[in-house]
Amino acid sequence: MIVNPLLKDTNNPIRAIVDNLVGKENPKKELISLAQGDPTAYGHLKPPEEAVTAVVRAYLSGNHNGYTASSGSVACRTALAAAHSCPNRPPLSCEDVYVTVGCSEAIEHCIAVLAAPGSNIILPRPGFPLYETLCQRHGVICRFYDLLPEDAWQIDIESIRRVADSRTAAVLINNPSNPCGAVYSREHLKTLIAVAGELQVPLLADEVYAGMTYGTPFVPIAEVAGTVPVFSVGALSKRWLVPGWRVGWLCLHDISGVLKGSGVRNALTKLCQISLGPSTPLQAAIPTILALKDNTWLTNVMDTMSLAAVSSVDRISKINGLSTVSLPQGAMYVLVRVDLVAFADCFTDVCFAEKLLEEESVLVLPGECFRAPGFIRIVTTVPEHVLQVAWDRIESFCSRHFGADEREAICRNSARDGHQADELGLPRVSSCLGGHEGLLLKPPKPYLIPEDEYHGCPHI
Ligand SMILES: Cc1ncc(COP(=O)(O)O)c(C=O)c1O
Protein backbone atom coordinates (compact mmCIF):
# COMPACT_ATOMS: atom_id res chain seq x y z
CA MET A 1 0.00 0.00 0.00
CA ILE A 2 1.31 3.46 -0.86
CA VAL A 3 0.42 6.34 1.42
CA ASN A 4 -0.16 9.80 -0.01
CA PRO A 5 3.29 11.42 0.32
CA LEU A 6 1.72 14.80 1.07
CA LEU A 7 0.25 13.27 4.22
CA LYS A 8 3.61 11.85 5.26
CA ASP A 9 4.86 15.41 5.55
CA THR A 10 1.72 16.62 7.25
CA ASN A 11 2.25 17.07 10.94
CA ASN A 12 1.21 19.35 13.73
CA PRO A 13 4.47 20.68 15.20
CA ILE A 14 2.89 20.88 18.65
CA ARG A 15 2.27 17.16 18.69
CA ALA A 16 5.88 16.11 18.27
CA ILE A 17 6.87 18.29 21.21
CA VAL A 18 3.90 17.68 23.47
CA ASP A 19 3.59 13.93 22.96
CA ASN A 20 7.08 13.70 24.39
CA LEU A 21 5.92 15.43 27.59
CA VAL A 22 2.94 13.22 28.31
CA GLY A 23 3.34 11.09 31.43
CA LYS A 24 6.48 12.88 32.64
CA GLU A 25 4.87 14.67 35.56
CA ASN A 26 6.10 14.14 39.11
CA PRO A 27 3.87 11.34 40.43
CA LYS A 28 3.96 12.93 43.87
CA LYS A 29 2.32 16.15 42.73
CA GLU A 30 -1.08 16.65 41.26
CA LEU A 31 -0.76 17.77 37.68
CA ILE A 32 -1.78 21.32 36.77
CA SER A 33 -2.11 22.07 33.06
CA LEU A 34 -1.55 25.63 31.90
CA ALA A 35 -1.22 24.30 28.40
CA GLN A 36 -4.51 23.57 26.76
CA GLY A 37 -6.33 26.16 24.66
CA ASP A 38 -9.67 24.65 25.64
CA PRO A 39 -11.57 27.21 27.73
CA THR A 40 -13.86 24.48 29.12
CA ALA A 41 -11.06 22.37 30.58
CA TYR A 42 -11.59 23.40 34.21
CA GLY A 43 -15.35 23.85 34.05
CA HIS A 44 -15.48 27.33 35.67
CA LEU A 45 -16.07 29.08 32.31
CA LYS A 46 -19.47 28.15 30.97
CA PRO A 47 -21.33 29.01 27.76
CA PRO A 48 -24.46 31.17 28.09
CA GLU A 49 -27.33 29.01 29.25
CA GLU A 50 -29.55 30.44 26.49
CA ALA A 51 -27.09 29.11 23.89
CA VAL A 52 -27.30 25.61 25.33
CA THR A 53 -31.08 25.87 25.50
CA ALA A 54 -31.24 26.99 21.85
CA VAL A 55 -29.32 23.87 20.80
CA VAL A 56 -31.42 21.54 22.94
CA ARG A 57 -34.57 23.13 21.57
CA ALA A 58 -33.33 22.59 18.01
CA TYR A 59 -32.66 18.91 18.69
CA LEU A 60 -35.98 18.37 20.46
CA SER A 61 -38.01 20.09 17.76
CA GLY A 62 -37.32 17.22 15.38
CA ASN A 63 -37.17 19.76 12.55
CA HIS A 64 -33.43 19.61 12.00
CA ASN A 65 -32.63 15.94 11.59
CA GLY A 66 -31.93 15.99 7.87
CA TYR A 67 -29.17 17.33 5.66
CA THR A 68 -29.14 21.02 4.95
CA ALA A 69 -27.44 23.08 2.21
CA SER A 70 -23.77 22.10 2.09
CA SER A 71 -22.49 25.65 2.72
CA GLY A 72 -24.86 25.90 5.68
CA SER A 73 -28.57 26.50 6.19
CA VAL A 74 -29.88 29.79 4.82
CA ALA A 75 -31.07 30.89 8.28
CA CYS A 76 -27.67 30.21 9.80
CA ARG A 77 -25.74 31.94 7.01
CA THR A 78 -28.10 34.93 7.02
CA ALA A 79 -27.60 35.39 10.77
CA LEU A 80 -23.81 35.13 10.34
CA ALA A 81 -23.90 37.59 7.43
CA ALA A 82 -25.80 40.12 9.56
CA ALA A 83 -23.45 39.63 12.51
CA HIS A 84 -20.35 40.14 10.34
CA SER A 85 -21.52 43.04 8.18
CA CYS A 86 -19.50 46.19 8.86
CA PRO A 87 -20.72 49.74 9.36
CA ASN A 88 -20.30 51.96 6.28
CA ARG A 89 -19.87 49.00 3.94
CA PRO A 90 -22.44 47.12 1.86
CA PRO A 91 -23.96 44.38 4.04
CA LEU A 92 -22.87 40.77 3.57
CA SER A 93 -25.48 38.40 2.19
CA CYS A 94 -25.88 34.74 2.98
CA GLU A 95 -24.03 34.05 -0.31
CA ASP A 96 -20.89 35.48 1.31
CA VAL A 97 -20.93 32.99 4.20
CA TYR A 98 -19.83 29.35 4.41
CA VAL A 99 -20.53 27.36 7.58
CA THR A 100 -17.74 24.98 8.54
CA VAL A 101 -16.69 22.35 11.06
CA GLY A 102 -14.97 24.70 13.49
CA CYS A 103 -12.64 27.49 12.54
CA SER A 104 -10.06 24.85 11.59
CA GLU A 105 -12.10 23.75 8.59
CA ALA A 106 -12.72 27.36 7.55
CA ILE A 107 -8.94 27.97 7.56
CA GLU A 108 -8.39 24.77 5.64
CA HIS A 109 -10.95 25.74 2.98
CA CYS A 110 -9.25 29.12 2.50
CA ILE A 111 -5.80 27.60 2.18
CA ALA A 112 -7.06 24.88 -0.15
CA VAL A 113 -8.66 27.47 -2.42
CA LEU A 114 -5.61 29.71 -2.49
CA ALA A 115 -3.11 26.86 -2.94
CA ALA A 116 -2.18 27.14 -6.61
CA PRO A 117 0.97 25.11 -7.35
CA GLY A 118 4.10 27.05 -6.37
CA SER A 119 2.18 29.65 -4.36
CA ASN A 120 3.14 30.84 -0.91
CA ILE A 121 1.18 32.16 2.06
CA ILE A 122 2.72 34.55 4.55
CA LEU A 123 2.11 33.51 8.15
CA PRO A 124 2.68 35.21 11.51
CA ARG A 125 5.70 34.23 13.61
CA PRO A 126 4.98 33.40 16.43
CA GLY A 127 1.76 31.83 15.25
CA PHE A 128 -0.77 29.06 15.60
CA PRO A 129 0.89 25.92 14.17
CA LEU A 130 -2.19 24.62 12.37
CA TYR A 131 -1.53 27.18 9.62
CA GLU A 132 1.73 25.47 8.71
CA THR A 133 0.20 22.02 8.97
CA LEU A 134 -2.52 22.98 6.50
CA CYS A 135 -0.14 24.70 4.10
CA GLN A 136 2.01 21.57 4.05
CA ARG A 137 -1.03 19.42 3.40
CA HIS A 138 -1.99 21.53 0.41
CA GLY A 139 1.52 21.93 -0.93
CA VAL A 140 1.69 25.68 -0.24
CA ILE A 141 5.03 27.21 0.70
CA CYS A 142 5.01 28.90 4.14
CA ARG A 143 6.75 32.21 4.51
CA PHE A 144 6.79 34.21 7.72
CA TYR A 145 6.46 37.76 8.91
CA ASP A 146 7.53 38.72 12.40
CA LEU A 147 5.51 39.89 15.37
CA LEU A 148 7.49 42.34 17.48
CA PRO A 149 7.70 41.26 21.14
CA GLU A 150 8.68 44.71 22.44
CA ASP A 151 5.97 46.44 20.41
CA ALA A 152 2.88 44.71 21.83
CA TRP A 153 3.51 41.85 19.39
CA GLN A 154 2.41 44.07 16.51
CA ILE A 155 3.18 43.07 12.96
CA ASP A 156 6.57 44.00 11.53
CA ILE A 157 5.09 45.37 8.31
CA GLU A 158 8.47 45.53 6.56
CA SER A 159 8.97 41.83 7.14
CA ILE A 160 5.84 41.19 5.02
CA ARG A 161 7.28 43.25 2.18
CA ARG A 162 10.58 41.36 2.44
CA VAL A 163 9.08 37.92 1.88
CA ALA A 164 6.18 38.69 -0.48
CA ASP A 165 6.56 38.04 -4.20
CA SER A 166 4.45 37.46 -7.28
CA ARG A 167 3.55 33.92 -6.03
CA THR A 168 2.15 35.17 -2.73
CA ALA A 169 -1.44 33.99 -2.49
CA ALA A 170 -2.39 35.62 0.84
CA VAL A 171 -1.20 37.15 4.07
CA LEU A 172 -2.68 35.53 7.16
CA ILE A 173 -3.32 37.49 10.33
CA ASN A 174 -4.56 36.25 13.66
CA ASN A 175 -6.27 38.90 15.77
CA PRO A 176 -6.62 38.57 18.78
CA SER A 177 -3.60 36.35 18.66
CA ASN A 178 -2.65 32.89 19.76
CA PRO A 179 -0.03 32.60 21.33
CA CYS A 180 0.82 36.28 21.94
CA GLY A 181 -2.45 37.60 23.37
CA ALA A 182 -1.99 40.65 21.12
CA VAL A 183 -4.94 42.71 19.87
CA TYR A 184 -4.37 45.09 16.97
CA SER A 185 -5.62 48.67 16.93
CA ARG A 186 -7.65 50.09 14.05
CA GLU A 187 -4.61 52.13 12.96
CA HIS A 188 -2.36 49.08 12.89
CA LEU A 189 -4.91 47.15 10.85
CA LYS A 190 -5.10 50.02 8.37
CA THR A 191 -1.33 49.85 7.89
CA LEU A 192 -1.59 46.17 7.19
CA ILE A 193 -4.42 46.71 4.71
CA ALA A 194 -2.30 49.32 2.92
CA VAL A 195 0.47 46.77 2.41
CA ALA A 196 -1.93 44.08 1.23
CA GLY A 197 -3.37 46.60 -1.24
CA GLU A 198 0.10 47.47 -2.47
CA LEU A 199 1.00 43.79 -2.90
CA GLN A 200 -2.46 43.03 -4.34
CA VAL A 201 -2.99 40.01 -2.13
CA PRO A 202 -6.08 39.04 -0.12
CA LEU A 203 -5.99 38.80 3.66
CA LEU A 204 -6.90 35.66 5.49
CA ALA A 205 -8.05 36.90 8.91
CA ASP A 206 -8.30 34.32 11.67
CA GLU A 207 -10.66 36.06 14.08
CA VAL A 208 -11.61 33.04 16.15
CA TYR A 209 -10.93 35.12 19.31
CA ALA A 210 -13.08 38.03 18.04
CA GLY A 211 -14.44 40.07 20.94
CA MET A 212 -12.20 38.34 23.50
CA THR A 213 -10.27 41.34 24.73
CA TYR A 214 -9.68 43.05 28.03
CA GLY A 215 -7.33 45.76 26.76
CA THR A 216 -7.32 47.19 23.24
CA PRO A 217 -10.84 46.75 21.79
CA PHE A 218 -11.28 44.24 18.96
CA VAL A 219 -11.78 45.65 15.44
CA PRO A 220 -12.71 43.18 12.66
CA ILE A 221 -10.22 43.83 9.87
CA ALA A 222 -13.04 43.89 7.29
CA GLU A 223 -14.13 47.21 8.80
CA VAL A 224 -11.00 48.91 7.43
CA ALA A 225 -10.34 46.65 4.43
CA GLY A 226 -11.43 49.08 1.71
CA THR A 227 -11.20 47.15 -1.57
CA VAL A 228 -8.78 44.49 -0.29
CA PRO A 229 -10.58 41.13 -0.22
CA VAL A 230 -10.75 39.57 3.23
CA PHE A 231 -11.41 35.93 4.01
CA SER A 232 -12.50 36.24 7.63
CA VAL A 233 -12.84 33.05 9.67
CA GLY A 234 -14.34 32.49 13.09
CA ALA A 235 -16.21 30.01 15.28
CA LEU A 236 -18.33 29.55 18.36
CA SER A 237 -15.41 27.65 19.88
CA LYS A 238 -13.61 30.23 22.01
CA ARG A 239 -15.83 33.30 22.33
CA TRP A 240 -18.86 31.17 23.26
CA LEU A 241 -16.78 28.62 25.19
CA VAL A 242 -17.94 25.58 23.21
CA PRO A 243 -15.01 24.24 21.13
CA GLY A 244 -16.59 20.80 21.12
CA TRP A 245 -19.63 22.01 19.18
CA ARG A 246 -17.45 22.38 16.09
CA VAL A 247 -19.31 25.29 14.52
CA GLY A 248 -17.20 27.68 12.47
CA TRP A 249 -17.60 29.96 9.47
CA LEU A 250 -15.94 31.86 6.69
CA CYS A 251 -17.16 35.30 5.59
CA LEU A 252 -16.00 36.68 2.26
CA HIS A 253 -15.64 40.47 2.25
CA ASP A 254 -15.04 41.62 -1.31
CA ILE A 255 -16.76 44.95 -1.93
CA SER A 256 -15.08 45.74 -5.22
CA GLY A 257 -15.59 42.27 -6.67
CA VAL A 258 -11.87 41.44 -6.96
CA LEU A 259 -12.73 37.76 -6.52
CA LYS A 260 -15.48 37.80 -9.15
CA GLY A 261 -14.68 35.40 -11.97
CA SER A 262 -11.80 33.84 -9.97
CA GLY A 263 -13.74 30.68 -9.18
CA VAL A 264 -13.14 31.18 -5.44
CA ARG A 265 -16.82 30.98 -4.46
CA ASN A 266 -17.44 27.94 -6.59
CA ALA A 267 -14.38 26.21 -5.15
CA LEU A 268 -15.48 27.02 -1.59
CA THR A 269 -18.92 25.57 -2.28
CA LYS A 270 -17.33 22.38 -3.62
CA LEU A 271 -15.16 22.09 -0.52
CA CYS A 272 -18.24 22.52 1.70
CA GLN A 273 -19.87 19.69 -0.23
CA ILE A 274 -17.27 17.30 1.21
CA SER A 275 -18.00 17.46 4.96
CA LEU A 276 -21.44 19.14 4.66
CA GLY A 277 -20.56 21.29 7.68
CA PRO A 278 -21.55 21.10 11.33
CA SER A 279 -24.66 19.29 12.51
CA THR A 280 -27.96 20.80 11.41
CA PRO A 281 -29.45 21.41 14.90
CA LEU A 282 -26.37 23.41 15.85
CA GLN A 283 -26.76 25.49 12.71
CA ALA A 284 -30.42 25.98 13.60
CA ALA A 285 -29.40 27.42 16.98
CA ILE A 286 -27.01 30.00 15.49
CA PRO A 287 -29.54 32.81 14.86
CA THR A 288 -30.62 32.67 18.52
CA ILE A 289 -27.04 32.45 19.79
CA LEU A 290 -25.84 35.41 17.73
CA ALA A 291 -28.83 37.47 18.82
CA LEU A 292 -28.11 36.98 22.55
CA LYS A 293 -27.78 40.21 24.46
CA ASP A 294 -24.96 38.74 26.46
CA ASN A 295 -22.83 41.74 27.40
CA THR A 296 -22.78 40.88 31.08
CA TRP A 297 -21.95 37.24 30.45
CA LEU A 298 -19.04 38.07 28.12
CA THR A 299 -17.78 40.84 30.41
CA ASN A 300 -17.69 38.36 33.29
CA VAL A 301 -15.82 35.79 31.20
CA MET A 302 -13.28 38.36 30.04
CA ASP A 303 -12.91 39.74 33.59
CA THR A 304 -12.01 36.25 34.76
CA MET A 305 -9.42 35.89 31.98
CA SER A 306 -8.12 39.39 32.58
CA LEU A 307 -7.65 38.60 36.28
CA ALA A 308 -5.72 35.46 35.33
CA ALA A 309 -3.55 37.46 32.91
CA VAL A 310 -2.91 40.28 35.39
CA SER A 311 -2.11 37.98 38.28
CA SER A 312 0.19 35.91 36.05
CA VAL A 313 2.01 39.01 34.86
CA ASP A 314 2.37 40.08 38.50
CA ARG A 315 3.80 36.70 39.54
CA ILE A 316 6.13 36.66 36.53
CA SER A 317 7.51 40.08 37.48
CA LYS A 318 8.65 38.63 40.82
CA ILE A 319 10.37 35.55 39.43
CA ASN A 320 14.03 35.73 38.47
CA GLY A 321 14.57 34.61 34.90
CA LEU A 322 10.98 35.10 33.67
CA SER A 323 9.44 38.19 32.07
CA THR A 324 6.49 39.32 29.97
CA VAL A 325 7.79 41.47 27.15
CA SER A 326 4.44 43.03 26.24
CA LEU A 327 1.28 42.77 28.28
CA PRO A 328 -1.43 40.52 26.80
CA GLN A 329 -4.58 42.32 25.64
CA GLY A 330 -6.91 39.43 24.83
CA ALA A 331 -7.44 35.89 23.52
CA MET A 332 -6.58 33.30 26.22
CA TYR A 333 -2.79 33.36 26.46
CA VAL A 334 0.30 34.92 28.01
CA LEU A 335 3.69 34.41 26.39
CA VAL A 336 6.40 34.32 29.03
CA ARG A 337 10.03 34.94 28.13
CA VAL A 338 12.49 32.52 29.75
CA ASP A 339 16.05 33.74 30.23
CA LEU A 340 17.71 30.60 28.93
CA VAL A 341 21.18 31.94 29.71
CA ALA A 342 20.28 32.27 33.38
CA PHE A 343 18.71 28.81 33.44
CA ALA A 344 21.91 27.15 32.30
CA ASP A 345 20.55 23.65 32.89
CA CYS A 346 17.56 24.30 30.62
CA PHE A 347 19.09 24.85 27.20
CA THR A 348 15.80 25.39 25.40
CA ASP A 349 12.21 26.28 26.19
CA VAL A 350 11.34 22.63 25.51
CA CYS A 351 13.85 21.54 28.12
CA PHE A 352 12.48 24.15 30.58
CA ALA A 353 8.93 22.87 30.07
CA GLU A 354 10.03 19.26 30.43
CA LYS A 355 11.91 19.84 33.70
CA LEU A 356 9.09 21.96 35.08
CA LEU A 357 6.72 19.08 34.41
CA GLU A 358 9.05 16.45 35.83
CA GLU A 359 9.70 18.36 39.02
CA GLU A 360 6.59 20.40 39.67
CA SER A 361 3.88 18.69 37.58
CA VAL A 362 3.02 21.99 35.90
CA LEU A 363 2.43 21.67 32.18
CA VAL A 364 3.13 24.65 29.91
CA LEU A 365 3.63 24.73 26.16
CA PRO A 366 7.15 25.47 24.95
CA GLY A 367 7.37 28.47 22.61
CA GLU A 368 8.93 26.27 19.97
CA CYS A 369 5.45 24.93 19.26
CA PHE A 370 4.64 28.40 17.91
CA ARG A 371 8.03 29.39 16.46
CA ALA A 372 8.66 31.43 19.59
CA PRO A 373 11.88 29.93 20.96
CA GLY A 374 12.85 31.21 24.40
CA PHE A 375 9.21 31.57 25.49
CA ILE A 376 6.59 29.42 27.17
CA ARG A 377 2.84 29.84 26.68
CA ILE A 378 0.37 29.71 29.53
CA VAL A 379 -3.41 29.96 29.32
CA THR A 380 -5.70 32.38 31.17
CA THR A 381 -8.53 29.85 31.39
CA VAL A 382 -7.47 28.36 34.73
CA PRO A 383 -9.31 29.16 38.00
CA GLU A 384 -7.43 31.71 40.10
CA HIS A 385 -6.74 29.42 43.09
CA VAL A 386 -5.28 26.75 40.79
CA LEU A 387 -3.26 29.35 38.90
CA GLN A 388 -1.73 30.65 42.13
CA VAL A 389 -0.63 27.15 43.13
CA ALA A 390 0.87 26.69 39.65
CA TRP A 391 2.79 29.97 40.02
CA ASP A 392 4.02 28.96 43.51
CA ARG A 393 5.44 25.84 41.95
CA ILE A 394 6.92 27.66 38.95
CA GLU A 395 8.50 30.17 41.33
CA SER A 396 10.00 27.41 43.41
CA PHE A 397 11.29 25.66 40.25
CA CYS A 398 12.85 28.87 38.97
CA SER A 399 14.50 29.68 42.27
CA ARG A 400 16.14 26.24 42.24
CA HIS A 401 17.31 26.53 38.64
CA PHE A 402 18.08 30.23 38.20
CA GLY A 403 21.83 30.61 37.87
CA ALA A 404 22.34 26.85 38.19
CA ASP A 405 25.13 25.22 36.29
CA GLU A 406 24.60 21.74 35.00
CA ARG A 407 26.37 19.84 37.75
CA GLU A 408 24.50 21.66 40.47
CA ALA A 409 21.29 21.05 38.64
CA ILE A 410 21.64 17.31 38.85
CA CYS A 411 21.81 17.55 42.67
CA ARG A 412 18.95 19.98 42.79
CA ASN A 413 16.80 17.71 40.72
CA SER A 414 16.35 15.70 43.88
CA ALA A 415 13.71 18.35 44.58
CA ARG A 416 11.41 16.30 42.41
CA ASP A 417 11.03 13.85 45.30
CA GLY A 418 9.53 16.74 47.27
CA HIS A 419 6.43 17.13 49.34
CA GLN A 420 2.97 15.83 48.64
CA ALA A 421 1.05 18.11 46.30
CA ASP A 422 -1.65 20.52 47.30
CA GLU A 423 -4.97 18.66 47.06
CA LEU A 424 -6.64 20.46 44.19
CA GLY A 425 -8.79 17.60 42.96
CA LEU A 426 -7.87 18.33 39.35
CA PRO A 427 -8.50 16.05 36.40
CA ARG A 428 -5.37 14.29 35.19
CA VAL A 429 -3.85 14.81 31.79
CA SER A 430 -4.16 11.81 29.58
CA SER A 431 -2.38 11.15 26.34
CA CYS A 432 -5.58 11.05 24.28
CA LEU A 433 -5.96 13.55 21.49
CA GLY A 434 -7.80 16.72 22.37
CA GLY A 435 -7.63 19.96 20.41
CA HIS A 436 -4.60 21.03 18.48
CA GLU A 437 -2.41 20.88 21.55
CA GLY A 438 -2.86 17.13 21.50
CA LEU A 439 -3.52 16.81 25.22
CA LEU A 440 -6.82 16.22 26.85
CA LEU A 441 -7.68 17.07 30.38
CA LYS A 442 -10.14 14.42 31.35
CA PRO A 443 -13.30 16.40 31.91
CA PRO A 444 -14.13 17.36 35.46
CA LYS A 445 -17.53 16.46 36.88
CA PRO A 446 -20.23 17.49 34.41
CA TYR A 447 -21.25 21.04 35.18
CA LEU A 448 -23.96 21.63 32.62
CA ILE A 449 -27.60 21.21 33.44
CA PRO A 450 -28.12 17.46 33.97
CA GLU A 451 -29.50 15.75 30.91
CA ASP A 452 -32.70 14.63 32.66
CA GLU A 453 -33.69 18.21 33.42
CA TYR A 454 -34.48 18.56 29.76
CA HIS A 455 -36.77 15.51 29.56
CA GLY A 456 -40.30 16.66 29.12
CA CYS A 457 -39.39 20.19 30.12
CA PRO A 458 -42.54 22.15 29.26
CA HIS A 459 -40.92 25.36 28.02
CA ILE A 460 -38.72 23.66 25.41
C1 LIG B 1 -5.75 30.94 16.39
C2 LIG B 1 -6.67 29.77 16.27
N1 LIG B 1 -7.35 29.58 15.13
C3 LIG B 1 -8.17 28.53 14.98
C4 LIG B 1 -8.35 27.60 15.98
C5 LIG B 1 -9.23 26.41 15.74
O1 LIG B 1 -10.52 26.69 16.17
P1 LIG B 1 -11.66 25.56 16.13
O2 LIG B 1 -11.55 24.79 17.40
O3 LIG B 1 -12.94 26.32 16.03
O4 LIG B 1 -11.42 24.71 14.94
C6 LIG B 1 -7.64 27.76 17.19
C7 LIG B 1 -7.77 26.76 18.25
O5 LIG B 1 -7.07 26.71 19.21
C8 LIG B 1 -6.79 28.88 17.35
O6 LIG B 1 -6.10 29.09 18.47
Image (cartoon, helix red, strand yellow):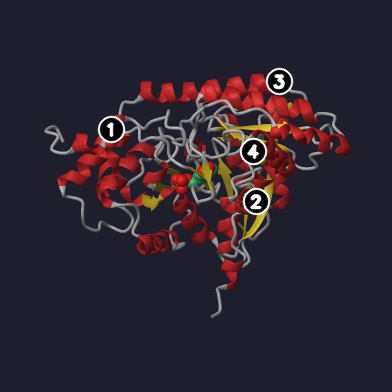
Amino acid type indicated by mark 1 = Ile
Amino acid type indicated by mark 3 = Ser
Residue 405 falls in which quadrant of the image? Answer: top right
Mark 2: C-beta under 8 Å from nearest atom of ligand 1: no
The mark nearer the N terminus, 3 or 4, is 4
The mark nearer the N terminus, 4 or 2, is 2
The mark nearer the N terminus, 1 or 3, is 3
Label 1: which secondary element: loop
Whether residue 147 is visible:
no
Residue identifier under label 4:
26
Q: Label 3: how many residues lie within 10 Å, few (<14), some (14-19) or many (20+)?
A: few
Label 1 to label 3: alpha-carbon separation: 40 Å
Amino acid type indicated by mark 4 = Asn
Is the C-beta separation of discs 3 and 2 under 8 Å?
Answer: no
Is 179 situated left or right of 427 in this image?
right
Quick one: 21 or 315, which is closer to the camera? 21
Label 4: which secondary element: loop
Q: Label 1: how many residues lie within 10 Å, few (<14), some (14-19) or many (20+)?
A: few
Quadrant in which the N terminus is drawn: bottom right
Residue identifier under label 1:
449
Mark 3: C-beta under 8 Å from nearest atom of ligand 1: no
Q: Nearer the viewer, mark 1 or mark 3?
A: 1
The mark nearer the N terminus, 1 or 4, is 4
Residue at 59% over, 72% down = 5
